[in-house]
Amino acid sequence: MASIVTDKFNAAHEVDHFPRPVVALHATHVATKDWESSKHQHRRAQLLYAVRGIVNCEIDDGVWIVPPQCAVWIPADLPHSARGSGTAECYCLFVDADAVPGLPETCCTISVSPLLRELLLKAVGFPELYAFGGREERLIAALLDELIAAPIEDLHLPMPRDPRLRRLAEMLLANPTERISKGDWAARIGMSERNMSRLLLQEIGMSFGRWRRQLHVILALQRLTKGESVQTVALELGYEDASGFVTMFRKAVGKPPARYLADRNAGMGSAAVPGIKLPDQAA
């Protein structure tokens, strides 16, 4: 079981009642195996920034991956859960929905620039009741400006609502390497291939092939960030060799896995690390 240590509060829900429009927390999840935070929600919006480890945030409509040096934005009052593996170190920013105009209105993964990162780490050390009009409030304003300007990365797996498609998603997540035809997947959930394809496009705006490739990119980033080799990840995801996997990853992310992770760990901005953009090819 994971234990969670925060530097200011005993319970995360206390942030909803804190007498400042913005508050930052430092949280460490210490786990001997996979950990999970059950579904909950906050009156305030939340920025969850992963410094170490991989964190996944899930809402009804999708799953967002939060690799190191990325953050996920969770709008106010949106039910969500989080999960990860091993030790994870995160910084959380809780923001009143009306604190400043221009904040993201939907759940998304954003690229954290070096300036945004430093401002967030600085805000964690502010007094609990920092003075209005003082230095701390001015730095908070700069932090919010950087947050509004932060580009969005498409590290997101949309999830369908139809129960049959949801079951398909669960099977793909449980067995991402299984290489059976689209028709066989459709048969497993009691649908025709045509109806499955039509309903997927209707619910998530993706073909089956694009959706599965998006899943592979997300799973690959989870494993690569934990230190597994490209060769190991490629084989675990069902590729015949590393070359085919690297080609797919480069087309999706804009650079090969090793370069992507090196740039991410160095804290480079989103101009150097574009979001995932997969061509919508039927497969």
Image (tube, rainbow, N blue to C red):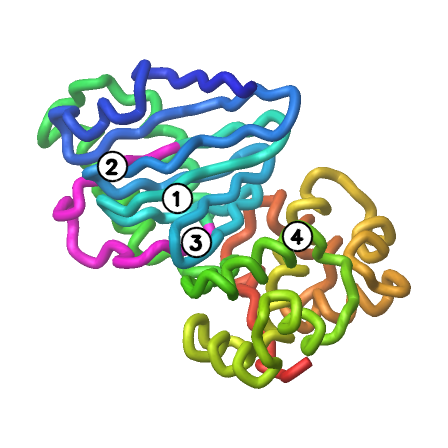
Alpha carbon distance from label 1 to label 3: 11 Å
What amino acid type is highlighted by mark number 3? Answer: Ile
Residue 172 percent coordinates (x, y): 64, 58
Q: What stretch is highlighted in magenta?
A: 92-111
What's the residue at 42%, 36% (across, down)?
Answer: 118
Kindly identify which residue carries mark 2.
42
What amino acid type is highlighted by mark number 1? Answer: Leu
What's the residue at 19%, 38% (across, down)?
Answer: 43
Kindly identify which residue carries mark 4.
219
Alpha carbon distance from label 3 to label 4: 18 Å
The answer to which of 278 and 175 lies nearer the viewer is 175
Q: Can residue 117 be seen in this view?
A: yes
User: N-terminal of the two: label 4 or label 1?
Assistant: 1
What's the residue at 58%, 70% (across, down)?
Answer: 190
Kindly identify which residue carries mark 1.
116
Kindly identify which residue carries mark 3.
110
16 sits left or right of 72 in the view: left
User: N-terminal of the two: label 3 or label 4?
Assistant: 3
Which numbered marker is on residue 65? none
Badge 4: how crowded within 10 Å, few (<14), some, or many (20+)? some
Badge 2: how crowded within 10 Å, few (<14), some, or many (20+)? many
User: N-terminal of the two: label 1 or label 2?
Assistant: 2
Picture quarter containing residue 180? Answer: bottom right
* SS under mark 2: loop
* SS under mark 4: helix
